[in-house]
Amino acid sequence: MSMLRVENVSKRFGGIVANHEVSFEVDEGRIVGLIGPNGAGKTTMFNAIAGFAPPTSGDIWLDGRKISGMTPEQCARAGIGRTFQVARTFTSMTALENVMVGCFLHERSQSKARASAEQLLEFVQLGRFRDRPAASMTISEQRRLAVARALAVRPRLLLMDEVMAGLNPTEVRDMVDVVLKIRGIGVSCLIVEHVLEGIMPIADAIVVLDYGRKIADGTPAEVSANPQVIAAYLGEE
């Protein structure tokens, strides 16, 4: 069953076409990678889905409900969580306080928000850092903290924007473990990623953008063998 359906979505900024009639789906409980060269329109697509930059044309549906044109808060309440290319943490706040911010979307009680935040920190392997200021955390830790805060809004679909960027191989494996755990609790994942060794082994499907257009989709094996993808993104042999 389709959790997310993107139908012929285009986004223009004046004369610049960032996305052109892009269509794809993310099935319930699946991991889908969204890949492509720099400037391919991946983050623009995320912004359209999450309500930060509504599409110029086309429609976006979440679990059968049209969400294109909604505000970011409305999209969050509808069931979308997201992270950003640069981990947006509140640096003067502790890890626990950062996650509590997301919890307050649904929790009125501070004690319940705190309990939920503590569980999420354990989920992303940051429980021991609950009282550490976000500013003192490593890039890897801050990226997992951003994932925990996104999960705090109780998403049905989680958009992750380059959560493995800048990480060493051990940190990539840690993030992969977190992503697999997220799928394990039934949350669908759409992941923009340049670290192919991180996304290719775990994705159920891959969508490839180039110059704002979808040039391929399918299983990781199918996409990796696609001549258009090789020429546009993976490079020649």
Image (cartoon, rainbow, N blue to C red):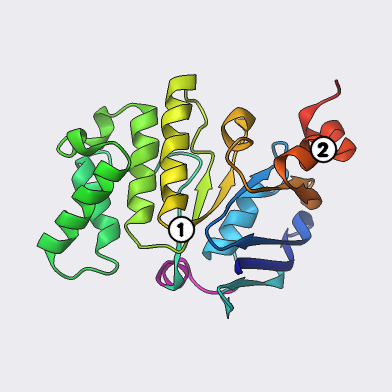
Residue 102 position within the rendered picture, expressed as x and y whole percent measured from the top left: 30, 58
Q: Secondary structure at mark 2?
A: helix
Q: Which residue is mark 2?
A: 229
Q: Identify the residue at the far left of this view.
A: 111
Q: Residue at x 29, y 36 (%)?
A: 125
Above or below — where is 21 with respect to 222? Answer: below
Q: CA distance from mark 1 to mark 2?
A: 28 Å
Q: Residue at x 77, y 29 (%)?
A: 234
Q: Which residues are magenta?
A: 69-77
Check residue 187 in the rendering and tell me which mark sits there, or answer none. 1
Q: Nearer the viewer, residue 175 or 56?
A: 175
Is residue 118 a member of the stretch shown in magenta? no
Q: Residue at x 16, y 55 (%)?
A: 115
Mark closer to the observer (1, 2):
1
Residue 69 position within the rendered picture, expressed as x and y whole percent measured from the top left: 58, 74
The secondary structure that dominates the magenta segment is: helix
